[in-house]
Image: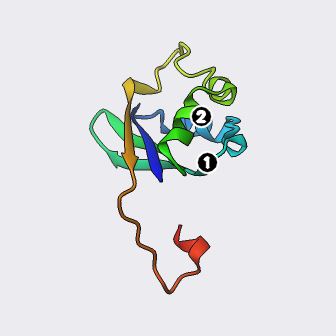
C-alpha cells in the first residue's frame, strides 16, 4: 500500500471554509484503479494556524502516480490555488508519501472495520 498525505497550515478562523472546500468537492477518486480510502484529518491548533492533512490510501505507488496524471485529478484540483479574498492556508501544502512496510489489524474486529 501507499499513503499519500498533504499537510495544510489552515489560517485561524478559516477552518470551516477549508473543511467546506473538501466536503463539497467532487473527487472522482472512486473511478481510479487502486484507490482504497480518503480521510481529511484535523490536527493540533497553533497560534496562527490549525494543522490539517489529507490522507489517501492506494494499493500501490504506481496507482497514486496514475491518479496524479489523470483527468480526474486535474478536474478535482481545478480550483486549488485560486485567489481568494482571504487565504485558507499559509504557504503551500506539504506532500509526504509513504510505502507501507507493516500492517496490523485487531483480530477481534471484522476485517472491514479494522481497515
Residue 46 placement, left or right of 90: left
Write the residue at 42% across / 42% down.
52
Could you tell me residue 77's position as x and y percent? 60, 25
Residue at horizontal 37%, vertical 46%?
Answer: 98
Q: How is the image coloured?
A: rainbow
**Disc 2: which residue:** 67
Distance from Cα at disc 2 to Cα at disc 1: 9 Å
**Residue positioned 57% across, 76% down in the render:** 111
Residue at 64% in and 27% down: 70
Query: Which residue reaches farthest left?
Result: 47
Secondary element under disc 1, as helix, strand or loop, is strand
Residues at circles 2 and 1 in contact by the CB criterion of under 8 Å = yes
Residue 24: horizontal and vertical position, in percent? Answer: 68, 37
- Image quadrant assignment for residue 17: top right
> Is residue 89 toward the left or the right of residue 40 in the image?
left
Q: How many marks do you count on the picture?
A: 2
Q: Which residue is mark 1?
A: 35
Q: Quadrant of residue 53?
A: top left
In this view, the residue farthest toward the front is 62
Residue 81: which disc? none
- Looking at the image, is mark 2 or mark 1 earlier in the sequence? 1
Residues packed near mark 2 inside 10 Å, few (<14), some (14 to 19) or many (20 plus)? many
Judge whether residue 55 can be spotted in this image.
no
Q: Is residue 27 left or right of residue 49?
A: right
Furthest-bottom residue in this view: 108
Is residue 82 shown above or below 19? above
Name the element at disc 2. helix
Residue 7 in the image: above or below residue 115: above
Residue 66 percent coordinates (x, y): 58, 33
Instruction: Looking at the picture, tell me which residue is in the foreground, 84 or 81.
Output: 81
Amino acid at each position: 500500500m501507499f499513503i499519500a498525505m498533504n499537510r495544510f497550515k489552515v489560517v485561524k478562523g478559516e477552518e470551516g471554509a477549508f473543511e467546506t472546500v473538501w466536503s463539497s468537492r467532487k473527487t472522482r477518486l472512486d473511478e481510479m484503479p487502486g484507490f482504497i480510502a480518503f480521510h481529511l484529518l484535523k490536527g493540533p491548533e497553533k497560534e496562527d494556524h490549525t494543522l490539517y492533512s489529507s490522507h489517501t490510501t492506494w494499493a500501490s505507488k504506481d496507482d497514486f502516480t496514475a491518479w496524479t496524471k489523470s483527468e480526474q485529478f486535474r478536474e478535482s484540483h481545478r480550483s486549488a490555488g485560486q485567489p481568494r479574498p482571504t487565504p485558507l492556508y499559509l504557504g503551500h501544502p506539504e506532500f509526504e508519501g509513504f510505502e507501507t512496510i507493516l500492517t496490523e489489524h485487531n483480530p477481534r474486529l471484522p476485517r472491514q472495520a479494522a481497515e
